[in-house]
Amino acid sequence: MTNSSVESNVVVVEVQGRVGCITLNRPKALNALSLDMIRAITHALLSWREDDHVLAVAVRGVNKEGPFGAFCAGGDIRFFHQAALSGNPALEDFFTEEYALNHLIHTYPKPYIAFMDGIVMGGGMGISQGASLRIVTERSKLAMPETLIGLFPDVGGGYFLSRCAGRLGEYLALTGLTLSGREAMSAGLADGYIDAGRLPGLWASLAQTPFENGASVERWCASHLSMTATAPSWPTKEVDRVFGLETVADMAAALAETDSDWGRSTLAALRQRSPLMLAVALEQVRRARSMGLADDLRMERELVRRCFHLRPGAGSDTAEGIRALAIDKDHSPRWHPATIEEVTPEEVAAFFVPPWPAHAHPLKVLG
Ligand SMILES: C/C=C/C(=O)SCCNC(=O)CCNC(=O)[C@H](O)C(C)(C)COP(=O)(O)OP(=O)(O)OC[C@H]1O[C@@H](n2cnc3c(N)ncnc32)[C@H](O)[C@@H]1OP(=O)(O)O
């Protein structure tokens, strides 16, 4: 039963039973997040945090056919491109508010259940990895693909990727590998599996179940899911050996010597991506391993500012990567530097120089 409902075009926010329900409703762009969507989600979460009637939150996406089928393909990269080129200050607000939302979700005091069916990438991971229950299906496709668009795995990616076993975080951050639902469970990036055909029933019954008697929403939901992770489908020893090396150039050299399909496809994936952002992402994940969430998000906020503003004249690999993938769709980005071997430590270090003094950091309030 719907108790209250606030609807806009792109995010449907409603309370059903004692569960706050958020539906991302921008299927033509695979529910890519606009600033309005980030604000609508943040507003709902902040009001439900104070509302004793609401015991839990559930979030899902729609595809062109109806509910589920796509979760979220990330931040709206076409907006990034247009805003960066036109100097639109809303781009700065976007990143500040998106990262603050990611922090709110990770620290949310009520169960937050993410129905991660279909595409879950970039910003989609940012609004699901902090969930107390991360549900995947046979249609789930999870990735942090940002190095392909000349960006780094932000939205808390440094934090949650660096917590993966061994050097898996470096591997996923650099290659942008897409994981199936089962693989995401093996990686520790999802908690429970259900066949996609059973999602509508799970969603409806979550909203219709009375939780007044202290029944745990998460335990109830988990009882409908398969919670057992299977063995990883990637060669864990090779991942640890190669992605534990010091530099991306060392990794590329090691992969070139690896006589295996995995080695060849992994090297090909690296060669497609921004050489500079591969090195930045590697440094990001390694620094984040010893950071808490808030410090990681502050570091990422500094890095993303550098991505769009660091190199006047030399251009931005981020703008170029988005152009090649989503604007001109020629899939032929011209990276600067052009190869992994040409990236210098000085170019990488420049990304980690804070653009603001600590007291002026846009995310200084995160605890
Ligand atoms: C701070 C936050 C940072 C981030 O989140 S950075 C973004 C991270 N995400 C990505 O880089 C993913 C970008 N998208 C893709 O690579 C592909 O899409 C997919 C692999 C997810 C799906 O591919 P396919 O099934 O072939 O669909 P399609 O035709 O590419 O996409 C359908 C429509 O959705 C738009 N779209 C997809 N992702 C985004 C996005 N992140 N921002 C804005 N639009 C997006 C496309 O452009 C297209 O639109 P049209 O039909 O008009 O050409």
Image (tube, rainbow, N blue to C red):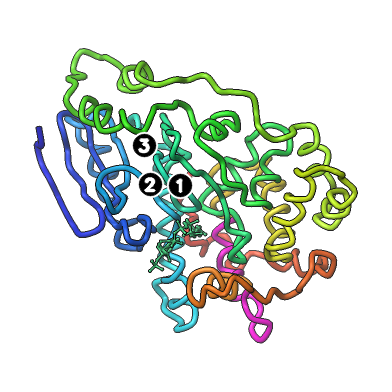
Q: Position of residue 166 (x, y in %)?
A: 73, 33
Query: Which residue does the numbered mark 2 point to in the structure image?
Result: 71
How many discs appear?
3
In the rendered view, does 5 fall on the left or right side of 165? left
Q: Which residues are magenta?
A: 300-316
Q: Position of residue 27 (x, y in %)?
A: 31, 56
**Residue at position x 46%, y 82% in the image:** 87
Label 1 Cα neighbours within 10 Å, binned few <14 / some 14-19 / many ≥20: many
**Residue at position x 79%, y 69% in the image:** 339
Query: Which residue does the numbered mark 1 point to in the structure image?
Result: 120
Query: Which residue does the numbered mark 3 point to in the structure image?
Result: 115
Q: Which circle marks residue 224 in the picture? A: none
Q: Quadrant of residue 189?
A: top right
Tag 1: amino acid: Val
Q: Quadrant of ligand 1?
A: bottom left
Is residue 318 part of the magenta span, yes or no? no
Q: Name the one closer to the observer, 291 or 344.
A: 344
Q: Name the one closer to the observer, 196 or 277.
A: 196
